[in-house]
Amino acid sequence: MNRPENFSSWATGASRSRSAGESLEEDLSRIAAVRAVIGDRPLMLDANQRFKPGEALQRIKAYARFNPVWMEEPMASDDALSHARLAANSPVPIALGEEVSTRFEFWNYVSAAAVHYLQPNVLKVGGISEWLKLAHLGNCANLFIAPHGALEASVIVAPAIPGCYAVENIDGGSFVDQGIAFETMKIENGTVTLLDLPGLGVEFDMDTLASYRSDPNAEIPLADPKKFYDNE
């Protein structure tokens, strides 16, 4: 249980804990350890789509004693109906969206009252313009919008949405963490300070990006399905 102590050094605003252990007792032990480290700071739980409907409600009721902000992705992200049933009975708000890619999928969740915190990822939904449409869709249903990952792009769109929740900064997920951009923003005490640069305010490392350039004339062989089935 060393991870809570390691995270506490930078998680000055909020902390997120993976739930969905092999047993409920294991989950409760892990969550209790995180809560003990962070005190009364916001705590988010994430199941990574692990649970089945009945199990999800059972576990969330047990987690509620730790007062989490949300339960993220409790079930398969394409099961809007089960999430609607869960959201109507869960003592903890439901968050999801990082694995939802189209406006039609988001509409299924919003129209069914199946989510409380909408988490579109600007890189997965088709860019800034589409992200803003999804965020406004959530606003129309009076939902919280919590941008998922894509730090450099998310901190640009977040201020454009009324009542936008905190941006999730995934360790290793930003352009800077991936080594393809120079540091152009300052993160201190959970707050991002942007520089006065155009566009996203990102200065890409063109030399590093060049190593990922592919030959536009390259031929990519398709998988042979016969070989796949022959190996079964």
Image (cartoon, helix red, strand yellow):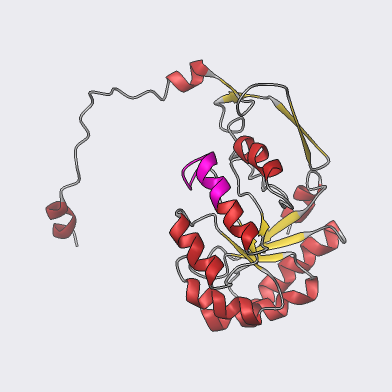
How many labels sit on residues?
0
Look at 49% across and 76% down and name the residue there: 81
Say whether residue 98 is magenta. Answer: no
Look at 64% across and 26% down and name the residue there: 201
Q: Is residue 50 visible?
A: no
Location of residue 175 by image quarter: top right
Q: Pick the residue in front: 27 or 70.
A: 70
Q: Is residue 39 left or right of residue 59?
A: right
Of all residues, the one furthest to the right in this rendering is: 39
Q: Pick the residue in front: 116 or 188.
A: 116
Q: Is residue 146 above or below residue 203?
A: below
Q: Is residue 34 left or right of residue 178?
A: right
Residue 72 appears at what percent x and percent y?
A: 62, 64
Q: Which residues are magenta?
A: 123-133
Residue 76 appears at what percent x and percent y?
A: 48, 68
Q: Is residue 148 above or below residue 116?
A: above
